[in-house]
Image (cartoon, rainbow, N blue to C red):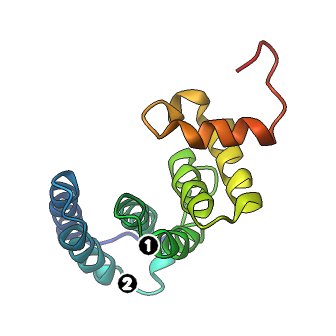
Amino acid sequence: MASLSEETHNRIRFLCAQGDEFAGMDDYPAALEQYWAAWDLLPEPQTDWEAGTWILGAVGDANFLSEDYAAGVDNLLLAMHCPNAIGNPFLHLRLGQCQFELNALDRAADELARAYMGAGSELFDDEEPKYFAFLKTRLEPPPGGW
């Protein structure tokens, strides 16, 4: 697989770091502007690049945190076409949470289960309890309990 030039890679990292700073201040529109600028630097098809995975993960996270759940689903589903996205517990968590909020409960359960299987209950520790509580209604308890 081809690699990004050092200049492009550094610019993408810089833009994403700026996006992360804005997200840390709850300025999600500004964060998204930086993330999308980074996405635009990826050669097409953008989904062929590992950087696309983490850029879209950041976009989906910002969508979720700003309660734009429909955009979160769209962007996180696109992320699933990028390298190493399928099986990434955090991406599955955010996608499941967005689907939960949109009342797509079967899809939410599937994604939240993938997140749980990939990282365990600790992944849910800093999240609203409703997501793990919902998941427990859809899965059998593991040996030894939750």
Task: Tell me the kind of residue under disc 2.
Answer: Pro
For the residue pair 78 and 146, the one nearer the viewer reads as: 146
Identify the residue under disc 1: 2
Of callouts 1 and 2, the N-terminal one: 1
| Residue 8 pos. (x, y %) | 22, 73
| Residue 81 pos. (x, y %) | 59, 71
Identify the residue under disc 2: 43
Query: In the image, is 89 to the left or to the right of 54?
Result: right
For the residue pair 27 and 1, the one nearer the viewer reads as: 27
Q: Secondary structure at mark 1?
A: loop
Task: Tell me the kind of residue under disc 1.
Answer: Ala
Q: Residue at x 21, y 63 (%)?
A: 19
Toward the bottom, the furthest residue is 44
Q: Is residue 138 above or below residue 72?
A: above
Residue 126: image tag: none
Q: Secondary structure at mark 2?
A: loop
Query: In the image, is 135 to the left or to the right of 63?
Result: right
Q: Can the viewer see residue 107 in this picture?
A: yes
Query: In the image, is 144 to the left or to the right of 7?
Result: right
Q: Residue at x 77, y 39 (%)?
A: 137
| Residue 125 pos. (x, y %) | 48, 30
The reply to whether discs 1 and 2 touch (Cβ–Cβ < 8 Å) is yes
